[in-house]
Image: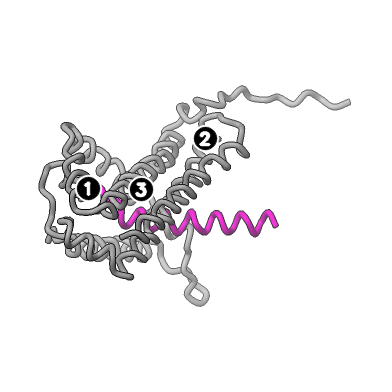
């Protein structure tokens, strides 16, 4: 005779609201919507670029919809905090570097990511003519 | 087989996550500048067209968009599960299909530039 196991009732849809750690996990995971959104914005730009100068200028004009600057600013901060910085923080866990018997300290891997990110960002800004 | 497939999907997810973590802050900033009407020199038609027409430009644009799309698709699949949707097969098919459509569109438009 087996006993009835006790199943703790956990909501399938709101389980992450119980705990700050789970909430941050969900805030991190939903950044995928931003990645998808900006991918398709970029694809829209490529379509305009392939269709010629007039279409490209119309695409640039369409980006000036009122309020979009504010939306992009909020998205930028959200993305930095929950995607870029979180990804760098997790990098040493996902890719530990073994040096003989020892492990390379986490902070070196994280710092290397920030340095590489700064270089890549400056390079793309330079390419785009921002700096 | 299942393990091999998982490694492949997770590999794309990790590569795409790294690429988007590195590149998207800049991309969003460029969209912010466009929204403000301050279009940088490199995004004027002649310059961006010349970049996208070069092999290096085509290759880097394709790799960034392709990997980021697959990263987003895989993470969205897990997000559906986390929000209580227990239809993994249908969700997986839908999100990977959208990523595939985006990838094909990217390749097609880059080919036409």
| In front: label 2 or label 1 | 1
Residue beneath disc 1: A55
Q: Is residue B76 left or right of residue B39?
A: right
**Chain of the residue displaying label 3:** A
Q: Are marks 3 and 1 in contact (CB under 8 Å)?
A: no
Q: Residue at x 25, y 47 (%)?
A: B28
Residue beneath disc 2: B80
Residue beneath disc 3: A39
**Chain of the residue displaying label 2:** B
Towards the viewer: B99 or A87: B99
As for residue A28 lying within the magenta part, the answer is no
Q: Range of the magenta residues? A: B1-29
Q: Position of residue A17 (x, y in %)?
A: 45, 27
Q: Position of residue B44 (x, y in %)?
A: 15, 56
Q: Position of residue B20 (x, y in %)?
A: 36, 54
Q: Sort mark 3 into few (<14), some (14-19) or many (20+) by Cα contacts within 10 Å.
A: many
Q: Secondary structure at mark 2?
A: helix
Q: Residue at x 52, y 26 (%)?
A: A13
Relative to A21, say whether B20 is above or below. Answer: below
Mark 3 to mark 1 CA distance (whole Å): 19 Å
Mark 3 to mark 2 CA distance (whole Å): 20 Å
Relative to A26, say whether B60 is above or below. Answer: below
Towards the viewer: B31 or B26: B31
Let me know if residue B29 appears in the view. Answer: no
């Amino acid at each position: 005779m087996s006993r009835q196991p006790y199943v703790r009732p956990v909501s399938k849809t709101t389980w992450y609201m119980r705990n700050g750690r789970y909430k941050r996990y969900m805030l991190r995971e939903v950044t995928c919507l931003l990645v998808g959104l900006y991918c398709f914005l970029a694809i829209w730009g490529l379509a305009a670029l392939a269709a010629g100068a007039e279409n490209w200028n119309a695409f640039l004009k369409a980006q000036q919809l009122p309020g979009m600057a504010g939306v992009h600013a909020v998205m930028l901060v959200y993305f930095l905090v929950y995607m870029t910085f979180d990804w760098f923080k997790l990098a040493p866990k996902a890719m530990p570097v073994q040096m003989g018997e020892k492990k390379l300290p986490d902070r070196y891997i994280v710092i290397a990511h920030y340095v590489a990110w700064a270089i890549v960002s400056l390079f793309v800004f330079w390419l785009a003519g921002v700096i | 087989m299942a393990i091999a497939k998982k490694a492949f999907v997770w590999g794309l997810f990790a590569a795409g996550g790294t690429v988007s973590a590195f590149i998207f802050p800049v991309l969003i900033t460029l969209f912010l500048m466009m929204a403000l009407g301050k279009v940088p020199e490199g995004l004027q038609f002649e310059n961006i067209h010349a970049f996208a027409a070069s092999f290096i430009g085509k290759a880097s644009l394709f790799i960034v968009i392709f990997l980021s799309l697959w990263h987003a698709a895989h993470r969205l699949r897990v997000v559906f599960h986390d929000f209580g949707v227990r239809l993994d097969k249908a969700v997986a098919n839908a999100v990977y299909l959208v990523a595939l459509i985006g990838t094909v569109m990217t390749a097609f438009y880059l080919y036409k530039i």
